[in-house]
Amino acid sequence: MKITLAHGSGGLQTSELINNVFANRFSNPILNQMEDSAVVEGAARIAVTTDSFVVNPLIFKGGDIGRLAICGTVNDLLMRGSIPRYITCGFILEEGLDSKLLETVVSSMADTAEEAGVVIVAGDTKVINGEGGMYINTAGVGFADEKVNCASANCKTGDVIIVSGNMGDHHAAILSNRMQIENNIQSDCAPLVEMVKNMLEENIDIHAMRDITRGGLATVLNELADASGCMMEISEELIPVAKDVKSFSKILGLDPLYMGNEGKLTAIVNAEHADRALEIIKGSRYGQNAAIIGRVTEGKGVIVNTHLGGRRGVGVLMGEGLPRIC
Amino acid sequence: MKITLAHGSGGLQTSELINNVFANRFSNPILNQMEDSAVVEGAARIAVTTDSFVVNPLIFKGGDIGRLAICGTVNDLLMRGSIPRYITCGFILEEGLDSKLLETVVSSMADTAEEAGVVIVAGDTKVINGEGGMYINTAGVGFADEKVNCASANCKTGDVIIVSGNMGDHHAAILSNRMQIENNIQSDCAPLVEMVKNMLEENIDIHAMRDITRGGLATVLNELADASGCMMEISEELIPVAKDVKSFSKILGLDPLYMGNEGKLTAIVNAEHADRALEIIKGSRYGQNAAIIGRVTEGKGVIVNTHLGGRRGVGVLMGEGLPRIC
């Protein structure tokens, strides 16, 4: 079946689409009430976020737009030290979209939500003219612990900079697909619930956390340096990059520092807790390649110590890294 | 300035767009932190919802996609008897969009959010290929009162059916614009905070509420009848329709029962409270044309008593009412 504008009417065909495609996989007691909004258990402090996903292609090695849409929002909630609980999904479908493709994406979202421990509590579907593509918005609500204060402005001189794994995988996977290059590079698209929960449970003193997406590590570290009024000093040779991604980037002249990921974070941690934090991340799902890559120092901006003993400043991404990467 | 794919990169040009267009109007202490998610005050029970907006044209008589995006989500939260608090905004911009147009929409969102008493706590911007259009997703969080139980399945035999104003205005305004018909019909696009708050404050026993959007009153009442296992019996002559909309619909052969609104609700109220509820709605902003239009009875589906003394059943909307109406 192909999606038509009538599937976005709000009438019978919208109901049929919801019943046949969404209800099959998203079914839960809250969503099944089919109300204008879901009334659910709250908490004294909550984290709220949103993200839209326009990735092209819709399905790629290591993931798809649905898995990405859940991971992106789940990870944004985690980055403030909150535990993700509820997700909303807004679908914008282009006329002509194959309903089988939609089912694959919806199914992947359901699996990823289950993995991440979140419940899809509200949804919406619209249909626009187009060529069979789709866009997904997810918003999320997490429960925040009043004791945790994880924010961009909290980085302190002496803190240790950790990344949770290899840089650039998602960017390299999407670009390989677009250029029709055959290789083994997979997107790293993943929900980082386990590593964050494990750190919080052991009361690791995390000053700031950011997931490393559009703009890459260089952009994220610059934003943290700006917000905290400090310098981020990292060593090139300590930055983990998978062998395949390294050679792929070298050939194309890309810098993994600016390449987006979808399942990696950087944590700025009190130096005394850094070794234990690294151990916890390495012992958690999706964290086996984690590494300490530098320190927070006095000054401003981001400095990279190069292989050859030089030092270079790196700014934020200028222009377009890779269109529609997420 | 025209929007380009680089504005969606996550790098410098994304920051510039955020600072120049969004920060100007959305600025608030929470959003200004520019974190991956906003950590805010919560409540023991919360309402959560989402809606995407793809209306074409972007600006129309009586509103624009921005006002619509705030009203739609605010109203969905209200329909469960919750008080809207936080809104997230996900923008999907088509390359070539004029930044002045974006500024107009953003400004309208800020004004509507202020009117509705909600804070925009999180946002996201993506850019896709296209022809200068835009899509907006909003998600919302409201604080729910444990005493209020306003749900589709709660309609009871004997309840009174109220609508808060004239049917079909938004549909007629959008269609007039598309057909380039000159008339005075304006969209009714509005946040219904005042009338709902006023009813809750007086402890009106509202069994169910729904905003009357895509699919129109007929579709909404059918959904309520289905969920509650009862019949909705309404009288044609009691349904308020503005004179201009009535003649417009007559000429085009449209039925106002199936025409979408963006600032109207139906409330299914305990019969003892119905007169007071009507009075409250009539005395609230956007409620002056409210009317009691019928009763909940035993049976199923929706029955309309016609002017001529006949009775006809009305089903849900089939096919496409009007593409991209919201």
Image (cartoon, coloured by chain):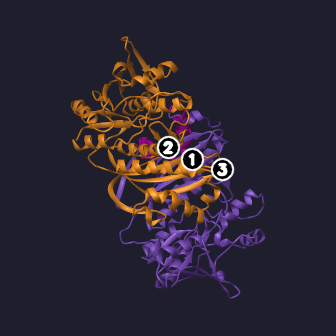
Chain colours: A orange, B purple
Q: Position of residue B310 (x, y in %)?
A: 67, 87
| Secondary element at image label 3 | loop
In the depicted structure, whether residue B281 falls above or below residue B34: below
Instruction: Give the amino acid at mark 2.
Output: Ile
Q: Position of residue A74 (x, y in %)?
A: 39, 46
Q: Distance between the Cα atoms at labels 2 and 1?
A: 9 Å
Q: Nearer the viewer, residue B106 or B90?
A: B90
Residue on which disc 3 sits: A129
User: What is the magenta range?
Assistant: B11-36
Residue at 66% x, 60% y: name it: B62
Instruction: Give the amino acid at mark 3.
Output: Asn
Q: Please check the rendered image and state whether residue B32 is part of the magenta-colored stretch, yes or no.
A: yes
Subunit under mark 2 = A
Say if labels 3 and 2 share a chain: yes
Mark 3 or mark 2, earlier in chain: 2
Residue on which disc 2 sits: A65
Q: Residues within 10 Å of mark 1 (few under 14, many from 20)?
A: many
Q: Please check the rendered image and state whether residue B28 is part of the magenta-colored stretch, yes or no.
A: yes
Q: Distance between the Cα atoms at labels 3 and 1?
A: 11 Å
Mark 3 or mark 1, earlier in chain: 3
Where residue A117 is drawn, which disc sits there? Answer: none
Horizontal relation, residue A199 to residue A262: left or right: left
